[in-house]
Amino acid sequence: MDIAGGTRENEKQRMEAFSSRCRENGIKLTHQRREIFREILQSRDHPTVEEVFDRVRRRMPTLSKDTVYRTLWMLREMGLIGTVGYPYRSVHFDGNDRSHDHFLCTRCGGIVDLEIRGERAVPADLGDLGRVESTYVEYRGLCRTCMNTEKE
Ligand SMILES: [Zn+2]
Ligand SMILES: [Zn+2]
């Protein structure tokens, strides 16, 4: 059910989008910021700030958690990445820019991308409310691992 990871081409284009957004906003595109964005683009498990920090720090020991935090939220504000998860738990960052749904495990908090198959049935006419441009569904339940633990 997983959507295949982003292509190199997609990664290149999005890195270019990041650098032009930085230029527009007068933000310096440092090596650390690039590496943080690259990590998100290559992850498909919706990592938290802590997880991104742990992974990128392995190749950049001078990295601070504060830089990771600020860079991820900057990317989110620039519309280059998304966020997902329960509001009362850690925020998870999402580098998948293709339209997709999520399956959230209510026990372990795991989040998996689900491909949208076919056309989604949406109310054809919202009347005065406006116009639907996209939809997003969050499925909640127990993942296979948690189901197996429950059985034991
Ligand atoms: Zn689970
Ligand atoms: Zn996702």
Image (tube, rainbow, N blue to C red):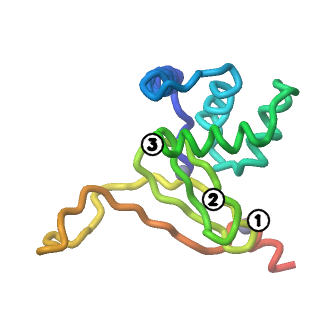
69 or 131, nearer to the observer: 69
Residue 60 locus on image (x, y percent)? 82, 25
Q: Residues within 10 Å of mark 2 (few under 14, many from 20)?
A: many
Looking at the picture, which amino acid does disc 2 mark? Ile
Give me the disc on residue 145.
1
Give me the disc on residue 111.
2
In the image, residue 147 sits, relative to residue 91, either above or below, namely below
In the image, residue 60 sits, relative to residue 105, either above or below, namely above
- In terms of sequence position, does the residue under pointer 3 or pointer 2 come before the other? 3
Q: Does the beta carbon of the residue at mark 2 sit less than 8 Å from ligand 2?
A: yes
Residue at x 18% of width, y 67% of height: 130
Q: Residues within 10 Å of mark 3 (few under 14, many from 20)?
A: few
Residue at x 67% of width, y 73% of height: 106
In the image, residue 95 sits, relative to residue 37, either above or below, namely below
Residue 63 locus on image (x, y percent)? 81, 31
Q: Does the beta carbon of the residue at mark 1 sit less than 8 Å from ligand 1?
A: yes
Which picture quadrant has residue 135? bottom left
Which picture quadrant has residue 27? top right
User: Does the residue at mark 3 contact the one at mark 2 (Cβ under 8 Å)?
Assistant: no
Q: Residues within 10 Å of mark 1 (few under 14, many from 20)?
A: few
Q: Secondary structure at mark 1?
A: helix
Q: Secondary structure at mark 3?
A: loop
**Which residue matches tag 3?**
79
Looking at the picture, which amino acid does disc 3 mark? Gly
Looking at the picture, which amino acid does disc 1 mark? Thr
Residue 11 locus on image (x, y percent)? 52, 26
- In terms of sequence position, does the residue under pointer 3 or pointer 1 come before the other? 3
Gap in angstroms between the C-alphas marked 1 and 2: 13 Å
